[in-house]
Image: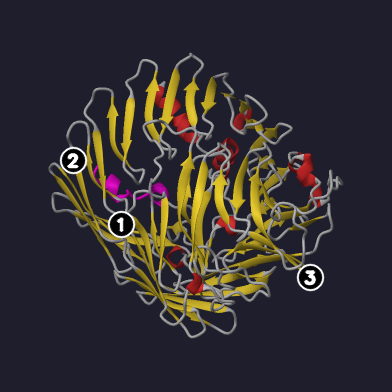
Amino acid sequence: MANNTAIVARSLWCDPMEQLLLQVQHSQRFHSEVQDPFALPEAAEIDLQSGTKILRDQLDLCLPDPLPLVISRSYSSQHSDNKTPTPVGLLGPGWWLPHEASLCLCDDGLVLHNGPASHLTLPALAPGEMTYSAEHRLWLVRGGSEQLETRSRHPAAALRLLWRSLHPGDRRRSSFFFVAHHALGPWWIFGPHRDQALVPGQRLPLRVIRDRFGRMLQFGHDPHTGLATVAEDSSGRQFRLELKYFPQLVRKSADGFGAELGWRMLGVHIIRDAHVQEAHPIKPHQPPIVRYEYTMRGELAAVYGRSETLQHHFEYHTLQPGRIVMHARAGRSDVAFDYSDDGQVVEQRTSGGHKLRFQYGESNTTTITDSLNRQRVLQFAKSGEAHRAVRLKRADGSSVGRKFDEQGHLITSTDALGRTTYFERDELTGQLLCVREHGGKERQMVYNAQSQLVRVTLACGTEFRYQYDLIGRLVASTGAATRTTRLRYAHDETHLPSLIEDARGDKLQLQWTPESLLASITNIDGQTLYLEHDRWGQLIQQQSDGAPRIRTLRDNHGRCVERTIGANPPTVWQYNPAGDLIHLRDAADNHLLIERDTHGRVLLQQTAGQRIEYRYDAAGRLIAISGKKGGTLRFAYDSMDRIVELTHANGSVQTFRYNTAGELFTPGKTHPPRHVEAIAHKRLPKPEEASRS
C-alpha cells in the first residue's frame, strides 16, 4: 500500500487538472504544438532576432503556498524604446522582478510593464470598461461596475466567474485595475496608494494577487517611495523585502534602461511563519533566504541562496553599464558574451571551449555557427507585435517552416519533407480547436466558457472528456474505454480534491496542509500514509500503517543527503557545488562514485569491481563508453546530432539512416524491419543507468 500511495502522492504535487491534461498531451497518440523544431537550447539565453542577451524566470525563492511569493529574476540587455520606460529595477539595470509589474496611466492609453524592456500598450478605460488582447491572452478590467458584459461571444463573458469572486467593494473601485491571463485567474490588481486620485503619468504598482477562492498574495508599499517592502502570502507567511538607497546612483536616465531611482533589494527575510515547526524557529537576526550583491555602478553582481553559498555571479561591460559579459553558475563553466557596437550578442563561449557565433542579416535573418562550424539560419517575420521565426535552415541543408496569424498564433508548421500540419484556432480567443496533419488525421479540442478543456478527440476516435463544477474545479475525467475518475472537494475555498474515485470504485482520501502540501492519503482499505514536509515544502518523513518509517535528511540546498527506512542503515548521497550526484552509498554499504566535468557530464562511474568511462566530442556528444573488461561502445553522429553508427565492443558495426525529416528508415523498404523499428524507439541509457546494465 505504501508504494502505491507514494506514487499517487507524487502525481498530485501539481494541480490534478494539469496532470490529467499532461497525460493526454504526452501520450503517443497526441502531439502538442509545444514541440518546437525551432528551439535551440544551446542559444536559449539569446534573443536570436534582436541579438539581445536574455535570462528568463531565474527562480530564487518560491515557498509552498496556493499563492506563493515568487522571487524570480528576468534580464534583458535591450534598451527600452518606450516613451515612458519603466525605471531601473530593484536588481539594477536590465533586471526585473515579478512584483515590480506596474500600470502606467498615459494621455493616450495604458501601458502595462510586465518584464525587462517589455511593455504592453492598451487603450484607456472608463470605469467599468474592459479590454482583451488575443495575442497576449490578457484581460484588463477597470473597476467601477458590479457586472461585466454577459453576451456569450464577448471576451468579458469568460470572466463572469472570476469577476464575481472579487469583493463587491473592490469591483466598484474605479481606481483599481484588474489584469488576468486566464479566465479562472488569478487577478493581478493594480491601484494607487490608499484613495489617491488617478492622474496622467501616474504609475500604479501591483497591490494584490487574488485567486477565485479569495486567497491573496498582498504587498505593502512604502508611502514615500511607492516600493514594495513587505509581502504576505495566502497561508499567512510574511516576508520583508530588504531595500537600500544608494544616492550616488540616482539619475534621470540610465543608459537606455529608464530613470535610476537609486534603490536596490539586498535580500528577502521571513519575518513570520505560522506553520513552521519549532525545530525551525525564526530567529530575530536570521540571515536572508535570498541575498544580492552589486557592483559600484549598481549592477547585480552575485546571488546567494538560503545556504549562504554563491549561486550566480555576473560581470558587465566596462563601457556599457548593465550589459552582461559573463555569467558564472555554481560548479559550472563560465559563459561569456561579446557584443557588437549595436549591442547585439555576436559570440557566446564557455570556459570549456564551446562557441556559438551569431551574424545578423539585413533581411531579418540570423546565422548561428557552432564550434564544429555547423551553420543554422533563422528567418523572422513580423507577426502581431513581435518578430517570430518562420523558417529554419538546418546544418544538413534541410529546412522547416511555419506561419502565424495576425495575433501571433501558430497556424501552420511544415517539416523538412514539405508536410504541413494545420492549427485551427478560435478567432476571438486564439484557443487551439483542431490540429490537422498532412495525412488527414485530426485532433479536436472543445472548451467551455471559462476556456477550460472539456473534450479532446484523437485521430483514432478516442475521446477524453472533462467535467467541472460551478467554480471551475475538475470533478470528472473520462479517458480511453470510457473509464471515469471522479474528484470531490471538502469545501468551496480549495482547489485541491479531498476524494479521488477511479472507474473500479477504488477511493483515495486526501488531506492537505494550509500550504497546499499533501499531508495524508487513505486508501479504500483504511490504510493511511502520512507525509511530513519541511518549511521549504520538501518531503522529510513518510509513515504508513504497518510499514517502517522513512526519514529523509536534506542539506541547506534542499537536496536529499540521507534516507533511512526503519532501523536499516541509511542511504547517503553527496553532491558537487553544482548539485550533481558524485557519491552514493546504499544501505548495504555499496558505493557508487561519479566524476563529472564542469558541464555536469559524467566522465567516470565506479562501483566495486566495475569502472565505466565516458568520452565526449567538442560539441558535447557522447562518443564512447568503456566498460570494465576493456570493451568500448563508440558512437558516430551526423550534422544533426543523430546517431549514424554504433560500434560494439566485439567490433561489429550497426548503422542508422534517416530521411530529411529525421525519421529512421531502411532504403528500399516501405516498412522498416522490426529490429530497426525497435531501434528507432529505443532510448539510449543515461550514464547513471549504464552501471546497472
Which residue is drawn at the image coordinates 40% and 70% (left, top)? 295
Say which quadrant the N terminus sits in.
Answer: top left
Which residue is drawn at the image coordinates 55% and 37% (left, top)? 236
Question: Residue 547: x and y, percent?
Answer: 34, 19
Task: Give the total of numbered labels.
Answer: 3
Q: Secondary structure at mark 3?
A: loop
Q: Report whether residue 248 is seen.
A: yes
Q: Amino acid at mark 3?
A: Asp
Cα separation, mark 1 vs mark 2, equals 20 Å
> Looking at the image, is 318 positioned above or below residue 662?
below
Question: Residue 272: x and y, percent?
Answer: 49, 39
Q: Are marks 1 and 2 in contact (CB under 8 Å)?
A: no
Cα separation, mark 1 vs mark 3, equals 53 Å
Marking on residue 600? 1
Give the residues in magenta. Answer: 674-693
How has the structure been colored for display?
secondary structure
Q: Secondary structure at mark 2?
A: strand
Location of mark 3 (residue):
107
- Closest to the camera, between mark 1 and mark 3, is 3
Q: Secondary structure at mark 1?
A: loop
